[in-house]
Amino acid sequence: MSSHSTIDAAASLISPQVSSDQFTQSAPLKLGIMASGNGSNFEVVAQAIADRRLNAQIQVLIYNNPSAKAAARAANRGVEAVLLNHRDYKSRKDFDRQIVQRLRQYDVEWVIMAGWMRLVTQVLIDGFPDKIINIHPSLLPSFKGIQAVEQALASGVKITGCTVHLVCLEVDSGPILMQAAVPVLPDDTSETLHARIQVQEHRILPLAIALAAQKQSLAAV
Ligand code: GRF
């Protein structure tokens, strides 16, 4: 048996196979990004825009944890960041109403949940029908919900990955836009596996945003 060290940890199967130069939309997509924590996915979307691999602009970052590193990343990039702390609202719906209002205030067209750790209500879904995108660290429909990486490790699967999908009310269940497969290595911990999954998240999220926009503009013709 060959050692796992011979596996190229960066290798991944991505589907569908698309490249940034095949997207031809003329007007920049107006994105609102929602993040609860580190914000590495916020960063890669911002970088894809800076590199002109994604024709978009980030109108605003909404974050719900005062200590979210995503806020500092937004400041570094000159992106406005708005703290909406869910603890300040009586209900999930009240919280989502405030989010919709803020996203509209910033003229957001597409909402990107990049590590948004809150359940959403119909209020948010109805605010941006078919225009909310989420990234999840598993090959959906496996391992929905929290601790997806831990769930994958505990189950013994040998391949997991990440999924970008449209958001519907049921958690981690909307139509799938793009997936990347990632091998589980014999001595993986949740940290090492999550780090390997994130490499692929960072590859597919900007592509999947462009793909979603292109699909909808083609469907509208
Ligand atoms: C990612 O693994 C994403 O799939 C999940 O939350 C994590 C966010 O990572 N929904 P980051 O904050 O973008 O670094």
Image (spheres, rainbow, N blue to C red):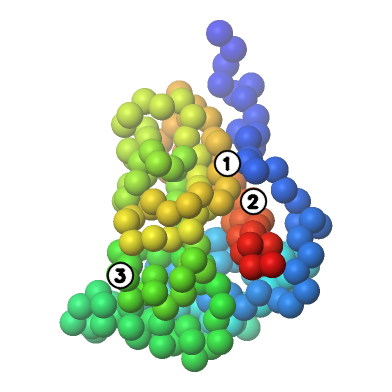
Residue 192 visible within the image? no
Look at 63% across and 40% down and name the residue there. Answer: 14
Q: Is residue 28 above or below residue 188?
A: below
Q: Quadrant of the C terminus?
A: bottom right
Q: Is residue 83 above or below residue 126?
A: below
Look at 40% across and 41% down and name the residue there. Answer: 141
Q: Earlier in the sequence, mark 1 or mark 3?
A: 3
Q: Are marks 1 and 3 in contact (CB under 8 Å)?
A: no
Task: Give the percent coordinates (x, y) of residue 88.
Answer: 24, 84
Q: Nearer the viewer, residue 179 or 150?
A: 179
Task: Give the percent coordinates (x, y) of residue 56.
Answer: 68, 73
Which label was assigned to residue 121?
3
Give the crowd class for mark 3: few <14, some 14-19, many >=20 residues within 10 Å.
some
- Residue hosting label 1: 180
- Circle 1: residue type: Ala
- Whole-number angstrom distance, CA of label 2 to CA of label 1: 9 Å
